[in-house]
Amino acid sequence: MRWLIRDSVVVCDHSGRITNQPSQSWVTIGGVPVLVEADPVGRTIVACPNYGPVVKPCATTLQVAVGYSGLIRVDGHRTVWTTCPG
């Protein structure tokens, strides 16, 4: 399990990059704020190459289905984590 921080690279299914925006700044890893519950929701996605005559590129993130810690919280908000390597 790896915690997501402001500088983590998060992408949509088509490799468009999500703009992380932490809502808290007092819990950090290496001086970089940890993301907590609701931070990944509604964020802008840039450079999604999924476009064409009948499809639109990803524009904003949706609700999180998997990735909130059931154990670790910051100010009552679950921390965000991933099982992806790197």
Image (spheres, rainbow, N blue to C red):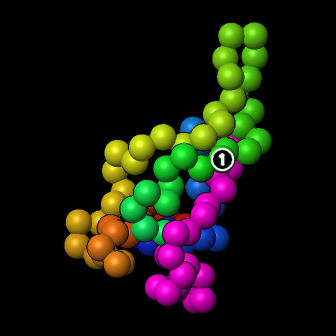
Q: Is residue 35 above or below residue 55?
A: below
Q: Is residue 82 above or below residue 28?
A: above
Mark 1 neighbour class, 10 Å CA radius: few under 14, some 14 to 19, many 20 or more:
some
Image spot of residue 29 (x, y percent): 52, 85
- Magenta segment, which residues? 14-34
Taking the image as drawn, is residue 83 in sight?
no
Q: Which residue is mark 1?
A: 44
Give the position of the N terminus as an image quadrant. bottom left
Number of dots carrying numbers:
1
Q: Main secondary structure of the magenta part?
A: loop
Image spot of residue 66 (x, y percent): 34, 50
- Which residue sits furthest top? 53
Q: Is residue 86 above or below residue 59?
A: below
In magenta segment, residue 25: yes
Q: Is residue 84 above or below residue 34?
A: above
Give the position of the C terminus as an image quadrant. bottom right
Residue 59, picture quadrant = top right
> Is 15 left, or right, of 79 in this rendering?
right
Give the residue displayed 60% in from the left and 89% down from the top. Answer: 31
Q: Amino acid at mark 1?
A: Thr
> Is 66 left, or right, of 54 in this rendering?
left
- Which residue sits furthest left? 71
In magenta segment, residue 53: no
> Is 18 left, or right, of 29 in this rendering?
right
Under circle 1, the secondary element is loop
Image spot of residue 48 (x, y percent): 71, 37
Give the residue displayed 67% in from the left and 44% down from the top. Answer: 45
Give the residue displayed 60% in from the left and 82% down from the top. Answer: 32
Taking the image as drawn, is residue 45 in sight?
yes
Give the residue displayed 49% in from the left and 60% down from the top. Answer: 39
Image spot of residue 65 (x, y percent): 34, 45
